[in-house]
Amino acid sequence: MRSEKQNLGEIYAERAMEEIEPQVSTISIPKIRETRDMVYNGTANPLDNGAMFINTPQAARNKKQKKRRVSPFTIVLLLLGGAVSSVLYIGNILAVGHLMVQINQLQIKHKQILNEQELLKAQINRMSGLERIQQVAQDQLGLRNPRQLPVWIEVDPERINEVEEVFQQQMKRER
């Protein structure tokens, strides 16, 4: 029949209109397994409720399952590690804040001590002035500046020897 037709377009149209027979596989797969495979690999239509496609040559096989790369134990450990690190970080921030408050208080106290020290130095300078000491000596102790210049006193060496002998005799009596 095809040999009689000379128009190639008609031949191709006729081939396209023919029903394709499903290819028969050398391996027999039960219908239940084919349906299951189609559901799991995403080729089945959910509205067909597992109905087979008539014109499909063979149901596609399931893809190999990928191994789970991250286990739940690893995820739990990561979450636990994250929680511990965040607690430590927040504790560190609080400790640093507390230390900053203490440093501020100590700096204020240091400034107060330095101010007191400067006041004491000023008071020492004021009280150690010669005019003030002279005034206190005159008012409270009754001391006066001498009116005449001091004179050098000369002591006889014989007199020194006599004093030393008396001193030695007193030392012998006390023993």
Image (tube, grey):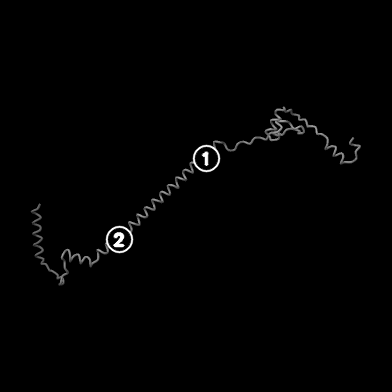
Q: Quadrant of residue 169?
A: bottom left
**Is residue 73 left or right of 114 when viewed as pictured?**
right
Mark sitting earlier along the chain (1/2): 1
Residue 105 location (% of width, % of height): 37, 52
Residue 61 location (% of width, % of height): 70, 33
Label 1 sits on what residue type? Leu
SS class of the residue under badge 2? Answer: helix
* Residue identifier under label 1: 79
Label 2 sits on what residue type? Leu
Direction front: furthest residue: 47
Q: Residue at x 56, y 36 (%)?
A: 72
The numbered dot on residue 156 is: none
- Label 2 crowd (10 A; few <14 / some 14-19 / many >=20): few
Q: Residue at x 33, y 56 (%)?
A: 112
Q: Quadrant of residue 168?
A: bottom left
Q: CA distance from mark 1 to mark 2?
A: 60 Å
**Is residue 59 left or right of 163 when viewed as pictured?**
right
Nearest the viewer among 71 and 98 is 98
Q: Is residue 24 above or below residue 120?
A: above
**Is residue 90 left or right of 173 when viewed as pictured?**
right
Direction right: furthest residue: 4
* Residue identifier under label 2: 119
Q: Residue at x 49, y 41 (%)?
A: 83
